[in-house]
Image (tube, rainbow, N blue to C red):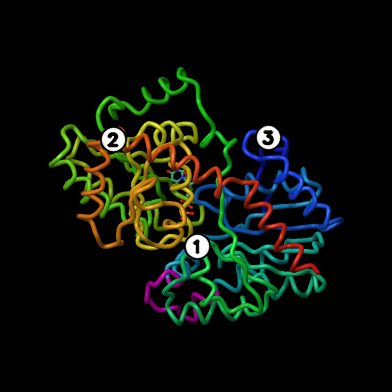
Amino acid sequence: MHSPSLPNRSIEMYGSVIDSDQLERLRSLAESLPDVRVLHVNSTATGGGVAELLRSIVPVCDDLGVQTDWVVMDATDEFFEVTKAIHNGLQGDRSPLTESMKSTYRAVTERNAAEIEDVYDLVVIHDPQPLGMLERLEETMPNATYVWRCHIDITDPSEEYLAFVSGYTSRVDHAIVSRSAYEANVEAPKTSVVHPSIDPLTKKNRSIDEETIETERDRMDPLSFDAPLVTQVSRFDPWKDQFGTLEAFHRAREHVTGLQLALAGGMAGDDPEGLEIYEQVAEAAADDPDVHVLTDLPDTRVNVLQRGSDVVVQKSLREGFGLVVSEALWKRTPVVGSNVGGIPLQVEHGQNGYLVEPDDVQGVADHLVTLLEDEDRRTAFGSNGRAHVRDHFLLPRQLADLFGVFVTVLE
Ligand code: UDP
């Protein structure tokens, strides 16, 4: 296990996006958690939404007086192959789960659990990867309360994988999911819904001066910000459907002169599929000078890209929540997204973007053309998107919801 480095954060820094009532509520919830020590456990410090979220939330919890630590598992490629299969199985993939996969999972999770020496009152286990640590942790911390936070889209899980994961989740005290539709498939004594959020203060989300924008734009050359631009920012992952986005782009381009597509993606530390999908996407785009496959962009460049795109697409086939959608809306960029997982919580059809069914490539193309041909609509959608995220998907709101759950489970 290791502890990632964290940015400096205090709740006061959120003064521009939190009113005094919200701040009071947060402070009073934090005061209801006196002397409570909280541990978050997940499986990567970089890449993907969970790491993004913990990096911001953990230091603010500490600032509010709720002692909070975050540790990340150390694991082998073999383990991450297994946990990606579990992730995919929970999202609906029907490949088999073998005894050998289960024993790899158990061995690595037990080894990681044995490395935790401190004692906590509340342990939050994120996603399936660290769930196998439970048995050992229950021995070393019998008085702790255990919460499983599931960030995955579990509307249609494989029975075999769900049964394996349920063997663990039935032992926790409480589970948290990102959308109420997921609750039915979680086997835990109690469940709550907490919508994730973005942090408006990170390099990825804060406003940027013109000079930095220009510098970062130059670094993305030959991508041009003077021609129409559609972007998807996602891990290279089968569920993110970069190929569907590519096809929708091809169809939209027939109507929009000079249209470009940026597919920005990274490799999360716990996601072994990334490289293979990246290579397939890069190959599919290789002969097209208007498709730009960008990898491992620094956060400021992701910010400039989301901000400078005319439309952002999120054509996922499954999506736990999809922080990238709020990231784009916060920057006043309209989003065309699939009507799956957490995307419809964020995209208000006809207000800040458009929702399409996940197999509807032509629908994506049509909505792209509508938006790309209508600057006034894009501007109006952009303002609506910013307001929607401000009201629902910024860090202080999520923190209040989380503290609310913590208070309940510790009662
Ligand atoms: N991300 C990034 N660079 C990339 C791809 C993704 O910084 O090349 C970030 C993205 O901005 C977002 C997170 O990774 O903050 C992805 O979170 P999301 O909830 O959208 O999806 P997940 O990867 O957790 O399925």
Name the residue type under label 3. Answer: Gly
Q: Which mark is residue 80?
A: 1
Of residues 204 and 81, which is closer to you in this image? 204
Question: Could you tell me if the residues under marks 1 and 3 are in contact, i.e. CB atoms within 8 Å?
Answer: no
Q: Which mark is residue 298?
A: none
Q: Which mark is residue 15?
A: 3
The magenta segment is 89-103
Is residue 258 toward the left or the right of residue 239 in the image? left
Which element carries disc 1, helix, strand or loop?
A: helix
Name the residue type under label 1. Answer: Phe
Locate residue 333: give its quadrant. top left
Q: Where 48 falls versus 187 (above or below)?
A: above
Q: Nearer the viewer, mark 2 or mark 3?
A: 3
Q: Position of residue 113 (x, y in %)?
A: 70, 66
Badge 2 local density, few (<14 within 10 Å), some, or many (20+)?
many
Q: Position of residue 267 (x, y in %)?
A: 44, 49
- Label 2 vs 3, first from the N-terminus: 3
Residue matched to label 2? 229
Quadrant showing the N terminus: bottom right
Q: Where 345 falls versus 16 (above or below)?
A: below
Which element carries disc 3, helix, strand or loop?
A: loop
Q: How many angstroms separate mark 1 from mark 3 (CA)? A: 40 Å
Q: Does the magenta portion include 99?
A: yes
Q: Please tell me which residue is depicted at 29% across the width and 33% down the height of the picture.
A: 375
Q: Which residue reaches farthest top? A: 211
Q: Where 79 falls versus 349 (above or below)?
A: below
Of residues 309 and 87, which is closer to you in this image? 309
Q: How many angstroms separate mark 2 from mark 3 (CA)? A: 33 Å
Quadrant showing the C terminus: bottom right
Badge 1 local density, few (<14 within 10 Å), some, or many (20+)?
many
Name the residue type under label 2. Answer: Leu
